[in-house]
Amino acid sequence: MRIFMTLVRLIVFLFLLSVAVKNSEMVTIHYYLGMEWEVPVVVVLFLCFTVGALFGYLSCLIKKIRKTP
């Protein structure tokens, strides 16, 4: 089972690495007051995923804390 999980992790890592390589184009993020940030698409995708995962984790954590007496 350990070998299987290692193989699955390797496949997922290689898939995500190939997505990162394919999405290396630069995008410009426009902020208020004329501020701009130019980054690769993969960075924007990673940041959005990370922020979403943090919000999901915090919402589950808050529910768990409220349930605990």
Image: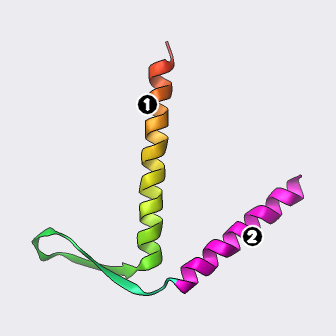
Residue drawn at x 78%, y 63% as measured from the top left = 8
Identity, as a three-letter code, of the amino acid under mark 2: Ile
Q: Is residue 16 magenta?
A: yes
Residue drawn at x 45%, y 69% as measured from the top left = 45
Residue drawn at x 48%, y 85% as measured from the top left = 24
Residue range (magenta):
1-22
Which quadrant of the structure image shows residue 16? bottom right
Q: Residues within 10 Å of mark 1 (few under 14, many from 20)?
A: few
Which quadrant of the structure image shows residue 62? top left
Say if 12 sits above or below 62 in the image. Answer: below
Looking at this rendering, what residue extends furthest in the top direction? Answer: 69
Identity, as a three-letter code, of the amino acid under mark 1: Ile
Residue drawn at x 58%, y 78% as measured from the top left = 19
Q: Which residue is mark 1?
A: 62
Q: Is residue 58 magenta?
A: no
- Specify how the rendered protein is coloured: rainbow
Q: Which mark is residue 33?
A: none
Q: Residues within 10 Å of mark 2 (few under 14, many from 20)?
A: few
